[in-house]
Amino acid sequence: MALLNVLTAPDPRLQAKALPVEKVDSSIRKLLDDLLETMYDKNGVGFASPQVGIQKRVLVVDLGERDGIQYKPLLMANPEIQWASPITQVTKEGCLSVPNYYVDIVRSLEIKVTYIDENNQHQVLNPKGLLADCIQHEIDHLNGILFIDHLSHLKRKLILSKLIREKQKR
Ligand SMILES: [Zn+2]
């Protein structure tokens, strides 16, 4: 496994639409493992392939232990939201590609998602709450959308201009 370099906004590579994988073979499994290792290293709970500049529809999620529930890591290729509840939830989200900003985002409370797992098996999942929020955030990355794109134009501009200034300092 290897740690990958995390892209931060603004970066055109974070706005690209990623392409589906044909199947989960050993090279995609290695990518999934590297994404997971990089996410753990940065204390993230979700991470998507475009965040390291690889435009494949691949993501990982691991909420760890929360509210007495021990979650298992989820490794997903070609995830597709088949249904999203009209009932919404508000979650304070952050993103490894938008470091140090945490903002309330409105998303569906529950979704139905299909995907291919790390063993190249088709799966269906009906996550609710934080897990549903996290998967929706990561699937957005595959479509070139960041969580700040859900904010008003003004709020997004404010965060992006601060991120640009921070990049210039480095
Ligand atoms: Zn993110």
Image (cartoon, rainbow, N blue to C red):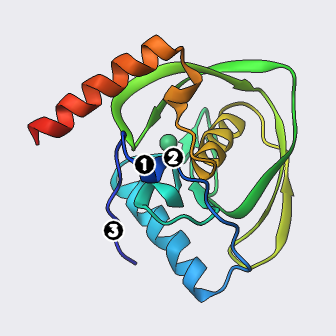
Q: In terms of image quadrants, where is residue 105? A: top right
Q: Secondary structure at mark 3?
A: loop
Q: Is residue 37 left or right of residue 119?
A: left
Q: Can you tell which mark lies on residue 3? A: 3
Q: CA distance from mark 3 to mark 2?
A: 22 Å
Q: Say which of marks 3 and 1 sits in front.
A: 1
| Residue 94 x, y percent position in the rendering | 45, 32
Mark 1: few/some/many CA within 10 Å (<14, 14-19, 20+): few
Circle 2 residue: 15
Circle 1 residue: 12
| Contact? badges 1 and 2 (CB < 8 Å) | yes
Q: Is residue 129 above or below residue 144?
A: above
Mark 3: few/some/many CA within 10 Å (<14, 14-19, 20+): some
| Amino acid under disc 3 | Leu
Residue at position x 63%, y 43% from top? 140
Mark 2: few/some/many CA within 10 Å (<14, 14-19, 20+): some
Q: CA distance from mark 1 to mark 2?
A: 5 Å
Q: Is residue 162 above or below residue 97?
A: above
| 33 or 13: nearer the viewer | 13
Task: Tell me which label, 3 or 2, sits earlier in the chain.
Answer: 3
